[in-house]
């Protein structure tokens, strides 16, 4: 039965399918604070991700929306849940700070019928000991934004946390103006981040560090648990996962916006959709965070920042890599120094797929770079340019340099020694036909938050099912903004 502090109503939760096993809560006390979400006044269900519910073995169909809203507001908690705020630290824009879940609460880990484990986290659920003067709350717009972008990322086949539900709270949050409060329920294969390790390393307790590393390996990479040097194996696999992830972002023109070490997961999932966005016009220096004055987290800088963050991660693992620090540094550096080459190779493979290229030829890199250079000079739309290469739309482009590039591309395609259909198939799963463009997302959020109209939001979510298709009904989502807004910025502290 649900524990309900506000009403005496109970119902049979067996019907829902929660199955909690809260392994993180069994770690050392320093890793978390046990506490309940702060109840909200008038919870109202805004959106429930039915597909995701089915995927993870949850069924809310027997409950009315009011009850569902109470659950996702944290006003009533399922039995088996053990709400906690996680402790972590992190480098924010290069500066180290103690952080922790300041407005989030993990109510527990749900194990699905096919034995996948997910953190169930409420974001915006009230203050915690890590709130650092913040109000612990979130506004409806940014929570719906995270819902949209994370679902887009999932449809794009990019590892990501997912969004299960959004409820409004019936309470205002004060930002520049009063805004409607909301709570997002997100699920993640874990919330272990580089910052989690930085926090433990900062405390200097080797035993806790060791148990955290073992815990993380068991949870995410159990195949490594018997390795000779688990510190080193762990570092290697996290580097590999991050290279894969960043290349996915580069593939679709995604800019995370706040790649602080606390926003980089160990699992390799994209996390924390704050001031992030997809690029319209190809401009490598594009930034989306209003406080990112120096372009630290610009599109083109993402691999270098990932490398920087991974060096911070490696620093936390040194005592496990080798008892002798100088030796440990040498061993870690050897792996970290491979990052640029590994990234570059993986980037080339990714870009070759975008152009339908099989095999490897000396001219490939230049062919790719020349296209990007042309796109930059001509202010071409990133998504639509690659899309046009699959639809023959590109043939309409009469620019001399572009035509010259096309001829080189065609010659290179011939070297594939495969039917052109194979190239097209490869391109079709790597070049999305639509992305959640800012101007569209803002329109949709305006309807949802200011006009009480969720239809545009639901329509966009439906279209994500066709994210790699060339369906005729998607064209309204393909147009770039009328006036390209290079200064589009989203804000932190959302
Ligand atoms: P983020 O930029 O969302 O990754 O958050 C960075 C840190 O600030 C995390 O420790 C968050 O929990 C915390 N934080 C963000 N917004 C709030 C808020 N409204 N109240 C309390 N803590 C917050
Ligand atoms: Mg964060």
Image (tube, rainbow, N blue to C red):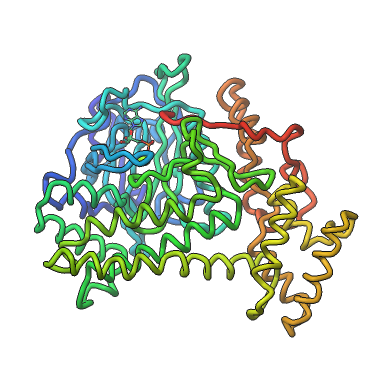
Q: Quarter of the image for the N terminus: give it.
A: top left
Identify which residue, 69 or 254, lies in the foreground: 254
Q: Is residue 429 left or right of residue 302?
A: right
The mark tally for this picture is 0
Q: What x and y, as percent, mark residue 387? A: 74, 57
- Ligand 2 image-quadrant field: top left
Please tell me which residue is depicted at 32% across the width and 27% down the height of the picture.
Answer: 136
Location of residue 471 by image quarter: bottom right
Identify which residue, 53 or 256, lies in the foreground: 256
Q: Is residue 319 above or below residue 13?
A: below
Q: Is residue 212 above or below residue 105?
A: below
Please tell me which residue is depicted at 29% across the width and 30% down the height of the picture.
Answer: 9
Location of residue 358 by image quarter: bottom right
Q: Is residue 363 left or right of residue 261?
A: right
Q: What x and y, as percent, mark residue 127? A: 27, 27
Please tell me which residue is depicted at 62% across the width and 26% down the height of the picture.
Answer: 447
Work out which residue is located at the far bottom of the displayed protein and give it: 417
Q: Is residue 359 above or below residue 300?
A: below
Identify which residue, 3 or 154, lies in the foreground: 154
Q: What x and y, as percent, mark residue 28? A: 12, 50
Q: Quarter of the image for the C terminus: give it.
A: top left
Q: What x and y, as percent, mark residue 357? A: 69, 74
Q: Is residue 326 left or right of residue 389?
A: left
Location of residue 121 by image quarter: top left
């Amino acid at each position: 039965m649900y524990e309900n502090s506000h009403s005496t109503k109970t119902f049979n939760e067996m019907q829902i399918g929660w199955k909690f096993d809260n392994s993180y809560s069994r770690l050392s006390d320093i890793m978390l604070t046990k506490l309940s979400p702060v109840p909200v006044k008038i919870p109202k269900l805004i959106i429930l991700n039915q597909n995701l519910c089915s995927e993870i073995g949850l069924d809310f169909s027997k409950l009315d929306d009011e009850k569902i809203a109470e659950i996702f507001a944290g006003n009533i908690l399922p039995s088996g849940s053990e709400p906690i705020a996680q402790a972590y630290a992190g480098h924010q824009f290069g500066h180290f700070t103690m952080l922790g879940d300041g407005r989030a609460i993990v109510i527990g880990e749900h194990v699905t019928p096919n034995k996948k484990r997910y953190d169930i986290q409420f974001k915006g659920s009230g203050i915690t000991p890590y709130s650092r003067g913040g109000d612990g709350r979130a506004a409806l717009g940014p929570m719906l934004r995270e819902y949209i972008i994370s679902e887009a990322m999932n449809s794009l086949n990019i590892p990501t946390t997912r969004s299960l539900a959004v409820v409004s709270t019936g309470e205002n949050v004060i930002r520049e103006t009063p805004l409607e409060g909301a709570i997002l329920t997100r699920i993640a294969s874990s919330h272990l981040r580089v910052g989690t390790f930085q926090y433990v390393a900062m405390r200097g307790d080797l035993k806790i560090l060791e148990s955290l590393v073992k815990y993380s390996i068991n949870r995410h990479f159990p195949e490594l648990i018997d390795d000779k040097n688990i510190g080193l194996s762990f570092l290697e696999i996290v580097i590999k996962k991050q290279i894969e992830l960043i290349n996915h972002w580069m593939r679709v023109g995604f800019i995370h916006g706040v790649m602080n070490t606390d926003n980089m997961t160990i699992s390799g999932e994209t996390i924390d959709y704050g001031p992030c966005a997809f690029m319209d016009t190809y401009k490598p220096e594009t930034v989306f965070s209003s406080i990112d004055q120096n372009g630290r987290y610009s599109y083109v800088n993402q691999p270098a920042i990932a490398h920087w963050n991974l060096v911070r991660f490696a620093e936390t693992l040194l005592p496990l890599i080798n008892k002798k620090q100088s030796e440990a540094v040498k061993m870690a550096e050897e792996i970290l120094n491979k990052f640029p080459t590994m990234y570059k190779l993986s980037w080339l493979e990714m870009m070759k797929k975008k152009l339908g290229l099989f095999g490897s030829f000396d001219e490939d890199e230049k062919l790719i770079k020349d296209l990007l250079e042309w796109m930059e000079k001509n202010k071409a739309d990133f998504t639509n340019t690659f899309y046009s290469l699959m639809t023959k739309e590109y043939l309409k482009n009469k620019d001399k340099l572009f035509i010259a590039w096309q001829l080189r591309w065609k010659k290179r395609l011939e070297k594939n020694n495969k039917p052109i259909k194979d190239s097209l198939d490869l391109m079709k799963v790597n070049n999305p036909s639509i992305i959640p463009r800012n101007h569209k997302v803002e329109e949709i959020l305006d309807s949802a938050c200011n006009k009480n109209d969720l239809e545009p939001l639901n329509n966009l979510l439906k279209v994500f099912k066709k994210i790699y298709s060339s369906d005729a009904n998607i064209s309204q989502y393909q147009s770039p903004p009328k006036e390209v807004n290079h200064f589009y910025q989203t804000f932190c502290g959302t």
